[in-house]
Amino acid sequence: MLGSFAGPILSSGTRTGEAEASVESTRLCARPELGYRDSADDSAPAAAGVSRSDPNLAIAFHHAPMGVVVAQPDGVIIACNPAAGQLLDRDPSDLLDGDVFAVVHPDDRADAQRHCARLLAGGTAVLRHECRLRLRGGRTIWVSMSISPVPQCRVRPDRLVIHIEDITERKRRESELSHQALHDPLTGLANRVLLIERIRQAMSGSRHARPSHLFYLDLNGFKEVNDRFGHAAGDAVLTEFAHRITALLRAGDTAARLGGDEFAVLCEDTEPRHVSTIAERLRAAAAEPFLIDDAEIILSVAVGSSPAYASPTYIADPAALLGEADRRMYETKQRTISVPVPAPRAQHLLPTPR
């Protein structure tokens, strides 16, 4: 009951004795478990930030659920709690005298050191920084670090108190959400939003001496595939076509599904004389039979293209370039309207039972 609580837990009698015993236990196992070290005097726990006169501090440090590291301004670790050792996959005592930046991923290390220098220079009272740590065996985790300085006083030099939290799962979910927001869920290709951004980037500067070209693709007769073979077969056709497009592209090119049976391909740094060859390869990718279950489905594709010159109109509205390529695709369809286009059909690969 609340009425039975009689003041602070360390205020008197038995509670004080129990706490002192607990602190003494913590101090005696400080090296292997708490990770305590004091360069001047191992017998003076106050110099390591764990005060014998305040046993609550030692208990809180040892049992904190979050990793806590105390370091010198140069990054040398002088204390760490068991939670930090577990997070870093190391015995806490093995971390003493090591460099806290040594476990930071090489690609993130300079940025972490730069932020820490800003903290020490008085640029901020508390630094919150996210970075990757590289553990033993090459495993990488994401962590959030909250770092606060302990100003110099008479009995100890400047120190940094670092709280470390594992945010790997959060980062994974953020990455998934980001990917879902910019990619087609069926094919995995870029969606319209990402394609527009790639067009904007391609025209934002002179990254390449040669222009980019945008190709707009529309599968002919795809509706009949869904009607005759079902939507599952239609999805399989779209997914396979996406794989074929991707296989044709270079590393810097972008393939996108715009919706339904419409796709787009952005080829950067492309010679104008190569445009017709690219279009023909895209048509050939669609003309190759699609093997779905025991059926062979034959389709074709209409292709329109537009050069992605850095014109004021397209820079201001990259979607306008997409509209132009779409218009040219339909012009291609109109010009070839008299040319027989194979209707989607299936050739059974397995003998039909009699």
Image: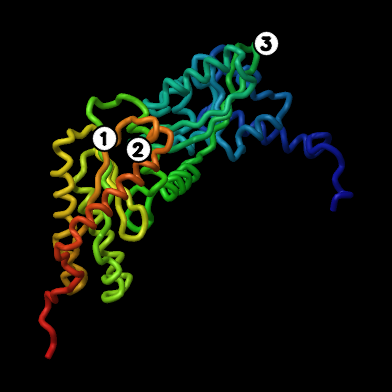
- Which amino acid type corresponds to the residue marked 1 in the rendered image? Ser
**Disc assigned to residue 21:** none
Q: Quadrant of residue 43?
A: top right
- What residue is at 14 percent from the left and 65 percent from the top? 340
Horizontally, residue 322 falls left or right of residue 281, namely right
Please tell me which residue is depicted at 66% across the width and 19% down the height of the picture.
46
Any mark on residue 153, and which? Answer: 3
Q: Position of residue 264 (x, y in %)?
A: 29, 48
Dot 2 and dot 1 residues touching (CB under 8 Å): yes
Q: CA distance from mark 3 to mark 1?
A: 62 Å
Q: Earlier along the polypeptide chain: callout 3 or callout 1?
A: 3
Label 2 vs label 3, nearer the camera: 2
Residue at which label 1 appears: 212
Tell me the quadrant of the picture where the C terminus can be found: bottom left
Q: Where does the image place residue 188, in percent across and percent down from the top left?
A: 33, 52
- In the picture shown, does residue 286 fall above or below 110? below
Residue type, numbered disc 2: Ile
Badge 2 or badge 3: first in the primary sequence: 3
Query: Which element type, helix, strand or loop, lies under badge 3?
Result: loop
The residue at which mark 2 appears reads as: 199
Residue 252 visible within the image: no
Q: CA distance from mark 2 to mark 3?
A: 57 Å
Above or below, 173 against 27 in this view is below
Viewer-side residue, 233 vs 260:
260
Count how many numbered circles sit on residues in the image.
3
Determine crowd level at label 3: few under 14, some 14-19, many 20+ residues with C-alpha closer than 10 A.
few
Q: Name the side, left or right, on which 145 lies relative to 185.
A: right
Give the Cα separation between the discs numbered 2 and 1: 9 Å
Q: Is residue 99 left or right of residue 65?
A: left
